[in-house]
Image: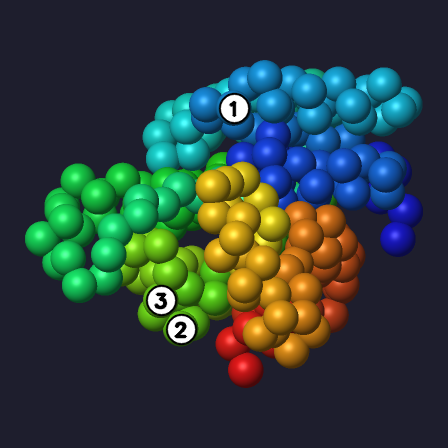
Amino acid sequence: MDLKNKVALVTGGGTGIGRATCLALAKRGAAVAVNYSRSKAEAEETAQIINSEGGHAIAIRADVSQDKQVREMVDTIVQRFRTIDFLVNNASITQHISFDDLEAATEEVWDELYDVNVKGMFYCARAVSPFMKNNKQGAIVNVGSIAGQTGLGSSLPYAVSKAAVHGLTKSLAHALAPDIRVSCVVPGAVATRWWAGKEEQMKRLAPNLLLQRISTPEDIAQFICAALEQEAMTGQIITIDSGQTL
């Protein structure tokens, strides 16, 4: 699908899956707002790559866990590009905590992960929805995780927060229908900086997957674009994990 004249906001757009998604959307003709919280240099580089190739992109800072910052970010994007057609809720954080260390899952850890991973996605969806409804069309893709399906992952609070993202997707699909479609892409292991320092572990995992390969950010980005473009789908939770959960 040609996305010329469409405008997309990608949270956490400077690195990993976020960057790959920004680049993929730009190649399809969309103008892209590359959101970041801390990765300023990476977000600006992502926008620069798009602009240097003839596309249209801006890097814009906002902590998605702060509703006021999210609303201000959306207003700035609309002032620049007139509207927002697509939202990719990609920004997420984690903390690596052993599952059997329940005491390490402190109130602060729970609050931090839920504020970004769950409430942040809701804040972004709420902020963009009036513009999408005004256009009588729009699409949101949340980035979940197989941790939310298996209950395993980098920490117990992270896994629970991603399960909440999957639930949020279905609830938003109900809340925003019929004008806005909402789905969730659920990656398994992806070769991003989250694996930094664990490359050997990643190499050991790959042969045990049905497809014997770790997904790339580009793999996930291609499906995010497909989900945004699919006009007959909403409320779906779709796993891309090379067979990791089978």
Residue on which disc 2 sits:
150
Residue mark closest to the camera, 3 vs 1: 3
**Residue 3 found in image quarter:** top right
Q: Residue 39: give its label.
A: 1
Direction from residue 223 to residue 115 in the image, left or right = left
Residue 183, horizontal then vertical, whole percent: 59, 62
Q: Is residue 108 left or right of residue 175?
A: left
Q: Amino acid at mark 1?
A: Ser
Per the rendering, the mark at residue 152 is: 3
Out of 110 and 219, give the one closest to the viewer.
219
Q: Position of residue 82 (x, y in %)?
A: 71, 26
Q: CA distance from mark 2 to mark 1?
A: 29 Å
Residue 21 falls in which quadrant of the image? top right
Task: Return the disc, 2 or 1, that comes first in the chain's sequence.
Answer: 1
Marks 3 and 2 in Cβ contact (< 8 Å): yes
Q: Give SS at disc 3.
A: loop
Residue at 70 percent across and 26 percent down: it is 46
Q: Amino acid at mark 3?
A: Leu
Three-letter code for the amino acid on which mark 2 is drawn: Thr
Q: Is residue 80 above or below residue 115?
A: above
How is the rendered protein coloured?
rainbow
Q: Secondary structure at mark 2?
A: helix
Q: Does residue 197 sit above or below 214 in this rendering?
A: above
- Of residues 85 and 25, the one drawn nearer to the viewer in this rendering: 25
